Amino acid sequence: MLQNHKLKPTVPRKAPNNSGDEIMVTKDFTAKAPSRRSVLQGMGAGLLASTALPAVAWAQGAPIKLGFQLHATGIGASYGRWYQRTADAAVKVINEGGGIGGRTVELIYEDDATDPARGAEVVDKFVNQHGCEVVLGTLFSHVVIGSAPRAGELRVPYLVCSEGYHVASGMLNRWTLQPGITDVRSQIASMAPWVAANLGKKVAMIFPDFAFGHDHRDFFTAAMTALGGEVVAQIAVPPTETSFTRYFPQIPADTEVLYHVMVGPGVLTFVKELGEFYGTAAKPKMFGFIDSLEAVDIASPGLEFLEGTHFWEAHNRMKPADAGEHEAAYRAAVGVDDKGASVSDPADVATYSHMFSAWETLFAIKAGMEACDYTGPADRQKFVEAMEAMSEMPYGIARPQGAKRFNGKTHQAFGTQNISQVQGGKLVRVHQTSMEDGAYPDQVDYTTQAF
Amino acid sequence: MAFGPFLLLALMEGMVSAAVLALTAVGLSLVFGVMRVVNVAHGAFFMLGAVTAWYVAKAVPGPAVAGFLAALVVAPLLVAALATLADRLVLRRLHYDPEATIVATIGLLYIVEQAALSLFGPDARPVEAPFTWRLQLPWFGYSGYKIFVVLAAAVILLGVYGFLTRTKAGLVMRATQVDRQTAQAFGIDVDRVYAGVFALGAALAAVAAVLVVPISQAHYKMGADPLLLSFIVVIIGGLGSIRGTLWAALIIGLGDGVISMFFSPTLAKIIATLLVAMVLVFRPQGLFGAKA
Amino acid sequence: MSVRVRIWGLHLAVLLGLWALQQVLPPYHANNLARIMVLAVFAMGYNIAFGYTGLLSLGHALFFAAGMYGAGLAVWQLEWAALPALALGLLAGGVAAGLVGLLALRTAGVSFMIVTLMFAQAGYLAILYFGRVTGGDEGFVVEAAGRQLFGADLATDGPRAVASLALFAVAMLANLVLTGSPFGRVMVAMRENEERSRMLGYNPFAVKLVALVISGVYSGIAGAAYGVMFGYVGANFATVQYSILPLLYVLLGGLGTVLGPLLGAVLMFYLVDFASSLTSAYLMVVGVALVVLVLFAPLGVLGTLRERWLKWLP
């Protein structure tokens, strides 16, 4: 089941694998944290649940309510829709496998309008109005940063699916965790060695002129410089821009690699205009973050020039030939075909490199809750401690994107990344990074902070 | 890239944005000039035009050009019909009071935007250009369709100008703009003129959107930026002055492209925004308006 | 009962009612009430410019953000305590309004709207441009140390409720005094007929500038309080959305009434909250509400009440 992953967890341990799409509870807590006893207990209970024995020891109580902060409207709406589908699918799988500790899971969605002020209000609503045990699901960084203080005040675990570098940078608080997706700093750092070795060392960067783009600018430039490369231009495009052509002349002629990342509704325009700009003339090699094409069909007219260029993907949109069984099960559960589009509408392309985080976060919540014998709001602190005690998170149905290592101190998960090449109009994986490629020194130790 | 080609590209890009801007702003300017109504929903009409173009392009079989031509007819008609409805049901009942209509059109904007989000979805969706000819210059390539957009906008704007200055309907509109009471005294049905102007303004926004949608995709929030820019253009050009609006569109469109060559683009936007404010402060009648 | 007694009685009763609500409401709604009261202070400031003086601005987000960033950056970058930071925020709002007013008040009507809109847009872009100092679009979290006021922790619900009510009470009573004062009448005179007031010897520019600065002070303290009380400062609060919000509150609650902004904020907040629990298309509900409102109650709830029955309402 791990055959297609170059990197195996340092303490690999196969969890009992049941037949069918039975949920597999994988736990591997190596840390000698204070909650070890409860972790072991949780494992026992988890195993019980996973072998489909009714969890006698666990009261068949009321459903566990989880609050999902959803970008249903506003600029994040494209992502929100897919996050919702993914989360619904994950909860279905979890409930079919016995729920969390024998209790069924109920997801409650509230639209945060991709707005930080509304985000904080929604956190309030989940906890005080709906009685949710934890809050999860936020993608856009400003909503995360706007909501996290309220989660801290309410002392409610807040599990974000954002890939932003706000959790691990120490900006937030002990109640905020990101167990389901690697942060952008690590993603970027892990790309630099491959780009330098395979594409070139003179890089021009084009990125959106706000925090997400600035992370790319700062961390990639630092990584490239450390490798002896050079970033010859940093071209920032203001948010709300709808036309990009006039920025392209700033790309120096001697550029070997064009590093591009763009977000928002203008992404397709961006890549199309890039293609028009170079046309048939000689062009630098291109390396892009798939964000530039998230929810966009790679076969759209005007994108032919991308043939042969490379993309970062967290999770391969087009199913790799050697994909494991869990990848297939995940796609089937969410309703995504092998090309990464909705099974019911091929024009509806998934935000495939981000949405797995909703799935994996839900399974991480299950693992954490079962590890600490979670019974109710009084155990929220125990839950965070149980999460902090996690370390190796192996590949499985709980983690279809791949194995991860959770850093309890920085509250951040780190996994592998993929580099794909456009070949014949398809994204084909050509390289997978190791977790070490994206490693960086801890910036914070949340475990020393008070609750 | 050398400075010359760089400037050439900036100017070409500027022409495209100026053309689209002029088309969008001229509708707003008409509504503003004749009815004294600040139509906040103008951007929503623009967006609706683009979304309609996407649906039409999908529904019409055959080559992309067929869908494009169909959209060029269907979108303005549909959007104009909606505008007429809004005029009948809301604006007329408010007696075109400037402040009340602002609030009402904000409401309209929300309604249209939400309808688009619910029915069309949150994704940006592409519409294929009617042709894919590319111009390859020695220094860079350029989309032939963009050049077509400039020409098409020029033709349409000439048509609008001719309509306003050479036809009876245009005369009636201009008369109403100059003096509503007198126009009424001469037997002009002002209500009908207003309905017509509002519909025409919306239709022009929709045409602009159909032209622009193969360049930038249809998206439910795409109306915000054109709305703001159109406002700037209308004000700079002088309230209700069509010729001023066209000049202002040219200046803003070209200026935006060229300024961002020399400054960081975000800084360029700050400077441009402040410049517009200063023009308004020190020349409230606009750069081209007659002194009040 | 004299009108004066009636007016003060009503407004003190409202304050008492708010206090009572804070005691009995479940935590979610009590916390909403704290937000609403701070936003109502912002709307009150907007009302002083728009409702009383007739200045329809589309740039009040700038003043709100000036207060929020004034206070937030003082805590974040300079490690100030909450009280001086709040004072700085209040000042920042007033200064921003004064500077904008000096230029923008040379225009009127639609031009004034656009000029204020442009200034606010430039302010928003400046926050993004100076991202290394301001935190850019992501914003920043206001640290715990900067949220201590008179020994109370504003990050906890109890002290926050008290603080929000105190702020609202001071703002409302000041508003009441202002509208009853001779200057308040001059403001209204500007709205009703600028030419006539000029002939009576008032300087319209000076009056409007003072009104706008007062409005900016209200917006500034509201922004500062919002940042410090809820712990987050972000560029989102500088977008045009936050210029339109107080306009909607005022129009909904009642143009040129002291209690209108509060009522408008309550109704709007719960309209969104309620509609979003029924349908994801809650913007539609808001849009329809706006249109219906402007068609059938153009003076807002309290404005209509005043016109029909309560002629004495300030």
Image (tube, coloured by chain):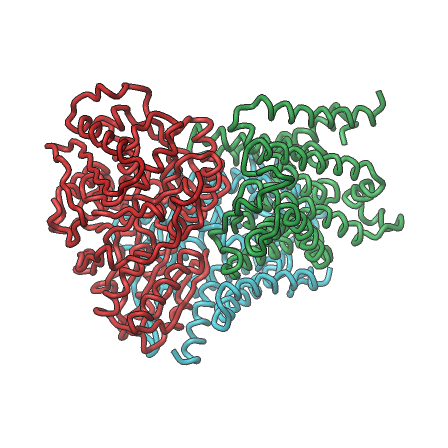
Chain colours: A red, B cyan, C green
- In the rendered structure, the answer to whether residue B78 lies left or right of residue C18 reads left
Residue B35 visible (yes or no): no
Give whichever of C299, C135 is nearer the camera: C135
Residue B213 visible (yes or no): yes
Give whichever of A221, C157 is nearer the camera: C157
User: Quarter of the image containing the C terminus of chain A?
Assistant: top left
- In the rendered structure, the answer to whether residue A370 lies left or right of residue C204 reads left
Give whichever of C284, B188 is nearer the camera: C284
Q: Residue at x 56, y 48 (%)?
A: B197
Q: Residue at x 32, y 23 (%)?
A: A63
**A132 in relation to A320, above or below:** above
Give whichever of C312, A83 is nearer the camera: A83
**A385 in relation to B225, above or below:** above
User: Quarter of the image containing the N terminus of chain A?
Assistant: top left
**A19 in relation to A300, above or below:** above
The residue furthest right is C200
- In the rendered structure, the answer to whether residue C3 lies left or right of residue A393 reads right
Q: Position of residue C159 (x, y in %)?
A: 60, 34
Give residue B192's quadrant in the image.
top right
All told, the count of numbered labels is 0
**A109 in relation to A310, above or below:** above
Q: Position of residue C71 (x, y in %)?
A: 61, 50
Q: Position of residue B182 (x, y in %)?
A: 72, 47
- In the rendered structure, the answer to whether residue B222 lies left or right of residue A66 reads right
Q: Position of residue A107 (x, y in %)?
A: 34, 30
